[in-house]
Amino acid sequence: MKLIMAIVQDKDSNMLQNEFIDANIRATKLSTTGGFLKSGNTTFIIGIEDARVEEVLALIKKTSHAREQFMTPPVSMDVTGDSSLSYPIEVQVGGATVFVLPVEQFRQF
């Protein structure tokens, strides 16, 4: 048995959740926030048999897409007191970050 933790962008989460339902994959869905862009993410926690891990990973890959987005970095002040103006920069967001962990025990009460 494996524990899969998948962090996906909110824009992809509903489609992924529907794919999990259609494939009869149970997942716990958590609302999370990314640290760098402070944007909304969804973290899915899935306990799954070893034989179905590749199936879950394929669904995540199919539904989680990277995209370009503009963000404005925070204004920085140096020691002289000069502030540099922040201009929007283009960054890549989305896709998925996935962790697959071994499970020593699984119990359901």
Image (cartoon, rainbow, N blue to C red):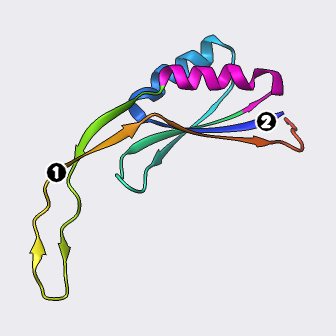
How packed is label 1: few (under 14 Cα within 10 Å), some, or many (20 or more)? Answer: few
Q: Earlier in the sequence, mark 1 or mark 2?
A: 2
51 or 27: nearer the viewer: 51
Q: Which mark is residue 2?
A: 2
Hey, what amino acid is under mark 1? Pro
Work out how far the residue at label 1 is from the one at label 2, CA to CA, in angstroms: 41 Å
Q: Nearer the viewer, residue 76 or 14?
A: 76
Q: Quadrant of the N terminus?
A: top right
Mark 2 residue type: Lys
Residue at 13%, 55% in the rendered image: 87
Local SS, label 2: strand
Q: Where in the figure is residue 90, as x and y percent of width and height?
A: 24, 44
Q: Position of residue 62 (x, y in %)?
A: 52, 19
State the image quarter where residue 91 is shown.
top left
Does the stretch in magenta take in 54? yes
The span picked out in magenta is 47-63
Residue at image coords 44%, 41%:
41
Q: Work out which residue is located at the far top of the displayed protein and give it.
A: 22
Question: Furthest residue to the bottom?
Answer: 80
Q: Which labelled disc corresponds to residue 88?
A: 1
Residue at horizontal 64 percent and vertical 26 percent from the top: 57
Q: In the structure shown, which secondary structural element does the residue marked by tag 1 occupy?
A: loop
The 10 Å Cα crowd at callout 2, few under 14, some 14 to 19, many 20 or more, is many
Residue at 46% across, 34% down: 95
Left or right, residue 104 beside residue 81? right
Classify 96 as above or below 33.
above
Left or right of 34 on screen, residue 82: left
Foreground: disc 1 or disc 2: 1
Task: Specify the principal SS of the magenta part.
Answer: helix
Q: Is residue 105 left or right of residue 30?
A: right
